[in-house]
Image (spheres, helix red, strand yellow):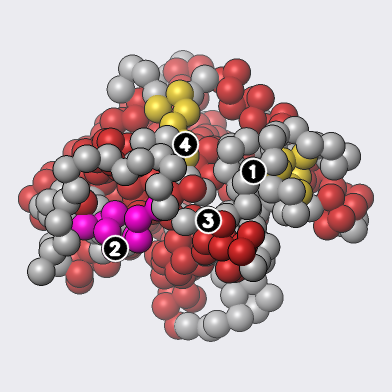
């Protein structure tokens, strides 16, 4: 029996409803559509083919670079479809979800099985809990000062606002997904290796086809490699690094070290940001920025997220962080959110000076 949907919003000062109650509000929205999911995959595959072909055949170098960036954006769209499939929220068939997810992940060179472990299990299971959730996890002043000088410089670069591509490429993809070491992934599975082999083969095939085009069409191989492979992949990595950064980094978003305190903070709502855009950019990103709804219930398909997010913001007024995007806001956030004071629950600069207001400790933690 499904739980009833309340008729009125929850008072902002009342206790947060149990997650089961909140998810019950979304039950009428969750339904998956296999035809719609397949149509979205076919659409983005066509867009990828068109933009990559245009990148190859346009002769103007600036035009090739710009088209390569557009191709990188389409790779991001394909990845978002795969992200849904990996959550089993894309189509009505689990096996189809798995194979579709693995297929569309190939364009971003993402090993499906390793993404599933790091994202579905770790990130969603322990969002913003230090020592568990590794995605853009901030360091304390003490931890930062204990780093070697080179690693401090790298951390400063990561958090400058200019290097989400580098963060995603090194700390997430290279270390944790592309043949990770035992230190990064103690669990060893054959599918981890084979998914790494698969994306390596895809990269080799992609580069090989560019070589064939170069030999038959008289274009510079190195120019093709740069504009039709390197630029799309780097743009995609910048896009992904940016998206995961803004999803959970905000002056009003807390990180926790204690699991009981983290749990009392209702992290499925309080640690996510709904970033809004103009000009249809949110829709172009397959509504992945309606992120609170996604963390409340991973089974909500991306093509239902906008409606689910609206439902949550109606029923939980004042509880969800809603931020209109601007580059001024983004770089201000990057300037303020360098390190984290886990005792005061506030962001600091690299000298440990607070740059945000300390957040209120969850009630359970106070009672303890």
Location of mark 3 (residue): 265
Of labels 2 and 4, earlier in sequence is: 2
In magenta, the rendered stretch is: 16-24
Q: Which numbered dot is residue 191?
A: none
Closest to the observer: 74 or 122? Answer: 122
Tell me the distance, in whole angstroms, between the alpha carbons under discs 4 and 1: 13 Å
Q: Is residue 72 above or below residue 134?
A: above
**Which residue is painted at 74% across and 48% down in the image?**
344
Query: In what quadrant of the picture does the C terminus appear?
Result: bottom right
Determine which quarter of the picture holds residue 292.
Answer: top left
Location of mark 1 (residue): 359
Residue 200 visible (yes or no) = no
Q: Position of residue 65 (x, y in %)?
A: 49, 25
Determine which quarter of the picture holds residue 289.
Answer: top left
Closest to the observer: 117 or 140? Answer: 140
Q: Position of residue 192 (x, y in %)?
A: 47, 75
**Which residue is painted at 53% across and 38% down in the image?**
246
Q: Position of residue 247 (x, y in %)?
A: 49, 42
Of labels 2 and 3, earlier in sequence is: 2
Tell me the distance, in whole angstroms, between the alpha carbons under discs 2 and 3: 16 Å
Question: Is residue 40 found left or right of 185 in the rendered image?
Answer: left
Location of mark 2 (residue): 20
Residue 23 in the magenta stretch? The answer is: yes
Q: Residues within 10 Å of mark 2 (few under 14, many from 20)?
A: few
Q: Which numbered dot is residue 321?
A: 4
Query: In what quadrant of the picture does the N terminus appear?
Result: bottom left
Question: Is residue 347 found left or right of 279 in the rendered image?
Answer: right
Q: For the residue labelled by badge 4, is the local secondary structure a helix, a strand or a loop?
A: strand
Tell me the distance, in whole angstroms, between the alpha carbons under discs 1 and 3: 11 Å
Q: For the residue labelled by badge 1, is the local secondary structure a helix, a strand or a loop?
A: loop
Of labels 2 and 1, earlier in sequence is: 2
Q: For the residue labelled by badge 3, is the local secondary structure a helix, a strand or a loop?
A: loop
């Amino acid at each position: 029996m499904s739980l009833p949907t309340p008729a009125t919003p929850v008072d902002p000062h009342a206790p947060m409803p149990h997650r089961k109650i909140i998810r019950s509000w979304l039950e009428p929205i969750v339904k998956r559509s296999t035809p719609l999911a397949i149509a979205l995959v076919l659409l983005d595959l066509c867009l990828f083919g068109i933009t990559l072909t245009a990148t190859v055949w346009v002769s103007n170098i600036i035009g090739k670079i710009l088209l390569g960036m557009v191709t990188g954006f389409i790779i991001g769209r394909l990845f978002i479809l795969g992200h849904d499939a990996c959550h089993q929220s894309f189509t009505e068939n689990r096996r189809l979800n798995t194979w579709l997810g693995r297929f569309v992940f190939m364009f971003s060179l993402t090993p499906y099985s390793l993404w599933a472990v790091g994202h579905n299990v770790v990130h969603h299971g322990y969002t913003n809990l230090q020592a568990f959730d590794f995605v853009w996890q901030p360091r304390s002043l003490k931890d930062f000062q204990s780093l070697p000088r080179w690693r401090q410089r790298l951390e400063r670069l990561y958090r400058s606002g200019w290097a989400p591509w580098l963060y995603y490429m090194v700390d997430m993809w290279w270390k944790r997904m592309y043949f990770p070491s035992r230190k990064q992934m103690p669990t060893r599975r054959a599918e981890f290796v084979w998914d790494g082999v698969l994306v390596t083969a895809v990269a080799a095939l992609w580069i090989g086809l560019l070589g064939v085009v170069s030999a038959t069409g008289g274009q510079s191989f190195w120019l093709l490699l740069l504009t039709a492979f390197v630029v799309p992949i780097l743009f995609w990595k910048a896009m992904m690094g940016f998206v995961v950064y803004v999803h959970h980094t905000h002056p009003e978003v807390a990180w926790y070290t204690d699991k009981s305190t983290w749990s009392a903070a209702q992290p499925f709502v309080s640690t996510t940001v709904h970033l809004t855009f103009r000009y249809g950019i949110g829709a172009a990103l397959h509504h992945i920025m309606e992120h609170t709804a996604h963390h409340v219930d991973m089974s909500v398909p991306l093509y239902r997220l906008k409606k689910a997010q609206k439902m949550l913001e109606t029923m939980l007024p004042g509880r969800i962080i809603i931020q209109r995007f601007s580059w001024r806001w983004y770089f201000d956030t990057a300037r303020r959110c360098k390190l984290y004071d886990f005792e005061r629950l506030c962001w600091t600069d690299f000298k440990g000076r607070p740059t945000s207001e300390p957040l209120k400790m969850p009630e359970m933690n106070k009672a303890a």
